[in-house]
Amino acid sequence: MIELRHITKRFNGVAALEDVSLEVKPGERLALIGENGAGKSSLMNVLYGLYQPDQGEVCFDGQVVKVKTPAEALARGVGMVHQHFTLVPTLTVTENVVLGHEPTKAGRLDLVRARKEVDDTCAKFGFQLDTGAVVRELSVGSQQKVEIVKALHRGVKTLILDEPTAVLTPQEADELFAVTRRLSDEGLAVVLISHKLKEVMAFSTRIAVMRRGKKVAEVVPGETSPEHLAQLMISLSSRERGEGRGEGPNQAPPSSGAVPDQPLTRPPATLSPLPQGEGTLQLTHLTAQGLHDLTLTLHPGEILGIAGVDGNGQRELAEVLTGLRPWTSGTLTFEHAPITRWTPHLARAHGVTHIPEDRLRRALITDLTVEENVSLGRHTQPPFAKGPLIDFPGRRALTTSLLETNDVRPRDPQLRAGGLSGGNQQKLVVGRELDSNPKVLIVVQPTRGLDIAAVAAVRAQLFTQRARGCAVLLISLDLDEVLELSDRVLVMYAGRITGEFTRAQFDERVLGRRMLGVVDA
Amino acid sequence: MILALLNSILDAAPPLIFAALGAVLSERAGVVNVGIEGMMRAGAFAAAVAALVMPTPLGVLVGMLAGAGVAAIHGWLTISLRSDQVVSGMAINLVMLALGTFLLEAVFNSPSSTPAITQLPLVFGHSPLTWLALVLPFVVHFVIQHTAWGLRLRAVGEKPQAVAAMGVRVGPLRFGAVLLSGALAGLGGAALSTATLDRFEHHMPSGLGFMAVAAMVFGRWTPLGAAGAAAFFAFGNALRIGLASSAPQLLEVVPKGVLLALPYALTLVVLSVQGAKNVAPAALGQPYDPELR
């Protein structure tokens, strides 16, 4: 049994963990839940030796142990599978698994024996993996299996999984949970870090809830509900955030008021009727690098969702639509007029705006101030400029009102954009892009890494835009999000569209199969 | 003529091959090493000076130690202090350039060279370092591809987090690779001052270190490829000498400077032709910070 006793960890004076105690028992499946930044990962990083606690201690079977490195954690039987895989893409599965404790014969790496040993481990726990394959060529689901096999091969007794399903299709997630059940039957302790309440309820034998660096509750799944868990996760924080919130988020038609009580329920099905006739933006047999023969129409007043596993052409699609990527054949039509030249500048001029996937790379310049960032893209136009000169008062006024309507905190136009939290950065980006009243909105992963309150605010904005008649293309790797927000969903696989579903046809299983390229008979 | 050309390649290639192998070791571990030039200079100087007071083979060893010592500075700056790897390498080059010139003046009271030493004795008509340069690429290849240390080296250059997660310490692993890199660069420098010539000259290694880095890129960060590329560059050098001696009338048409620039121009041409097909280690140039995810 492992005990974490009164752990406190600070980063630059800010407490990431405050007096947290937790037990992990053999054979159990413990879920650790909480919002982003609640301290779930930090706590497990302490157990895994990646962070040193400022106060508190780690006990293995009643013995206080200082875990200084992951090597020591591994030696004590603790393995961790991170959200971002720690695999070497250019090496084979076997090489990745044996890295750090390689079998050798007379100084020479014995890959034959290594592969046999790894195959044995896979067989023992029921993993099907080609151990000779190069990791780069495996699917994300298989790469995750490699991560787990890596830990099991070291003979771990406690396995920590950090947000394991974030990158998986529903089928792959099911498979993962079947595996973890088998592991706990074998007597291993499995710790799942997650914020998806549905899977937590299905997976765990015990649930620990964290909020703002503290453990606030411990429950068993039979005595709780997703709604109750959600309340435990956010009640305090969202009440605080809810005070004095601007009008923006609350105006939203379907999901307003859903923030504190039922953050994960879908909006009611009373959606505006789908508009008839031809739409605003059309692709016809369009082929570009990474995209094959795409035909799709984006109508005004709808949210069109793109579902798919990461790396199946979603990024490329967004880049084509926003003018960042040229296409080789096919046509792009905007308001019935074929487009021949399409650059980010022209796209913006036509009213097509972009909320990119990576806000730090494509949306914000972190070393510039908030107001400077707000002016980006429109910096040559009023109210940001007067002729060739910057209009400082105009920029300040617009920024101030934008921070207010979008509830960006703190409301400081002169703060470095990098000084904002992720959620506030995203609200700033969303606010900036929507301020120009776009006709078309290309949104990629709009809520990644945000806490529940910020997620709700961003989603509400999307609904507001739809109600305004804006055409919204939503690309997200989170299938739940796509299904929750979209009026219509296209599934992408290997750069092609492999399915189209209207809201009435939404079925996770069917979509999941299409996401894997399986076409139903 | 062809035999003469081959012989001159065999004589010109070893410094480049050793230095290119050194560059491979460092960069495969994820540490950019443009300081090869400075490490070669240190090796050349130290070997020539040491050979004045001890047998020349021992002098070569001293040259390797000097290269490793300079590499230790590079490792300390870039691995321990996580400073910019390119800047550190260039700083090392500048310091070594100045230090070599200064020591020539201060110790030997000469602006051009150290006193002559006994060259390494010839084996089958060539310096023993030539034969070593033929074998060493295969040794380095074996170490990188077929030993546990080599596997870790490849892994740490691609994804240091993976190596750390498996309980191997990134810092010492990279430091070892950089030290070896410096020792090989030092060996390359020593080959210049104990085999190619019989003394340290003020201009050594006159850009060979940069050419070695280019050879490593051309050879796609593999020991055999880098050594092959180094031999190719040496061929350019040999061609220049060969052209100048076998066809002196050429010098009346082509300015001497153009011939001198031939190996360097060849380097540029090769790099521009190869262009984007390079396959550098993924984590090259990135300092490793364990608490940064």
Image: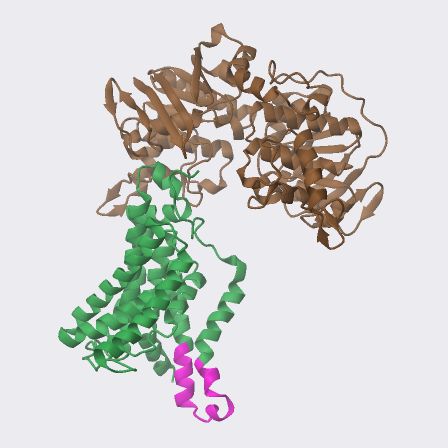
Chain colours: A brown, B green
Estimate the x, y position of residue A521 in percent, counting from the top left: 66, 25
Q: Quadrant of the N terminus of chain B?
A: bottom left
Can residue B134 be seen by looking at this rendering?
Answer: no
Please tell me whether residue B207 is drawn above or below residue A36 in the rendered image: below
Magenta segment boundaries in residue numbering: B237-260
Which residue lies at the image location 30% right of the left edge and 42% below the top edge? B169
In the rendered structure, the answer to whether residue A235 lies left or right of residue A373 reads left
Among the 4 quarters of the image, the one containing residue A449: top right
Give the prevailing secondary structure in the magenta stretch: helix
Q: Residue at x 78, y 39 (%)?
A: A282
Q: Quadrant of the C terminus of chain B?
A: top left
Image location (x, y in percent) of residue A437: 77, 36
In the foreground, A38 or A101: A38
Magenta span contains residue B114: no
Relative placement, left or right, of A459 versus A145 is right
The answer to whether B206 is drawn above or below residue A307 in the figure is below
Q: Residue at x 40, y 78 (%)?
A: B237
For this orientation, the residue located farthest to the top is A223
Position in image of residue A241 (x %, y %): 58, 22
Front residue of A194/A248: it is: A248
